[in-house]
Amino acid sequence: MADSTKIEIKIPNQSEYVGVVRLAISGIANRMNFSVEDIEDIKIAVSEASANAVRYAYTNTKIGYIDITCIPEKDQLEIIIKDSGIGFDLKNPHKPKKQKEEVPNLGLGLVFMQSLMDKVNMSSAPNKGTTVHLIKKVPSLSLKSKN
Amino acid sequence: MVLDLKIDVKKEENIPVIILNGEVDIYTYPKLSEALDKVIKDGSQSMILNLEKVNYMDSTGLGAIAAGANKLSQFGGHMNIICNQPQVKKIFKVSGLMKKNLSIFDEKDEALAKAKQKTK
């Protein structure tokens, strides 16, 4: 059985690279049969997940990395955003440690991910990092381009 | 596509207008927050935020705008937003911010008319 195609991006936990992830993901989504609106939705959802990792995953004194994996398939695009940072108890999420700067986001990151993507799964545990799976279904089964 | 945010601040009929061009995200939002703070500190009770040339915004941008609108409302002011980009309007709707202390307009003339009411 052939493995799915994977595109992997690794960024440091610095806010200036979230836009780079957005560009890359929109390029991948553009190769599939997504509408402009779908691509914008995907960009926001991935940015929200990546920004959360930048904000919360690592302590202020440590540089950490965030791994983004894209798996384009015939009927969906799966995106996995994974960090190996401090994680949290999903059943009992606590207020994150104070960051260097207070970044406003109204706590809407997860709301946007759930509203704009077709499936969202999050797994996390204290000191074991956090993984977010996002899936967007392709509107039709045809792909724009083939190898 | 620009991965940055440019901000111009000018006055129209004595009402401060902040014009954004580019993307508002976790990296660029401080510029927006700074521009909003400056306008509010200058004592403006009414202002316009022009998002016509914003091609990307997420919850960080919304948070900066909401914080600015809250500060402005503490001084009796109101934030008027020009936004006709469908995707940017969509995130205002999803967030529920449209019900808070700000107004969103498709056209500049409508926003200006509302802003002038507040200054009378």
Image (spheres, coloured by chain):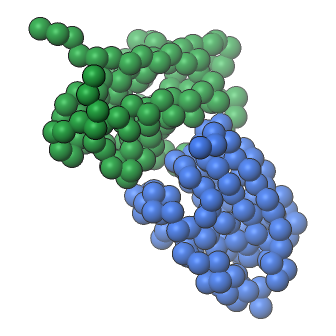
Q: Position of residue B15 (x, y in %)?
A: 80, 77
Give the side of residue B120 with respect to residue A144, left or right. right
Whether B105 is drawn above or below A126: the answer is below
Query: In the displayed image of the protein, which residue is found farthest to the top?
Result: A1
Whether A82 is drawn above or below B102: the answer is above
The quadrant of the image that shows the N terminus of chain B is top right
Q: Position of residue B38 (x, y in %)?
A: 83, 58
Is residue A74 among what the camera can see? Answer: yes
Give the side of residue A126 with respect to residue B35, left or right. left
Residue at image coords 66%, 66%? B50
Give chain B's shade. Answer: blue
Whether A34 is drawn above or below B117: the answer is above
Write down the quadrant of residue B44 in the picture: bottom right
Is residue A122 among what the camera can see? Answer: no
Give the side of residue B8 with respect to residue B110, left or right. right
Query: In the displayed image of the protein, which residue is found farthest to the right?
Result: B42
Residue at image coords 27%, 22%? A147
The quadrant of the image that shows the C terminus of chain B is bottom right
Q: Position of residue A134 (x, y in %)?
A: 31, 32
Write down the quadrant of residue B72 in the picture: bottom right
Camera-side residue: A28 or A130? Answer: A28
Instruction: Spot the green chain and give its letter.
Output: A
Residue at image coords 68%, 42%? B4
Residue at image coords 28%, 17%? A5
Whether A66 is drawn above or below B77: the answer is above
Camera-side residue: B101 or A114? Answer: A114
Q: Position of residue B109 (x, y in %)?
A: 65, 83
Give the side of residue A19 with respect to residue B34, left or right. left
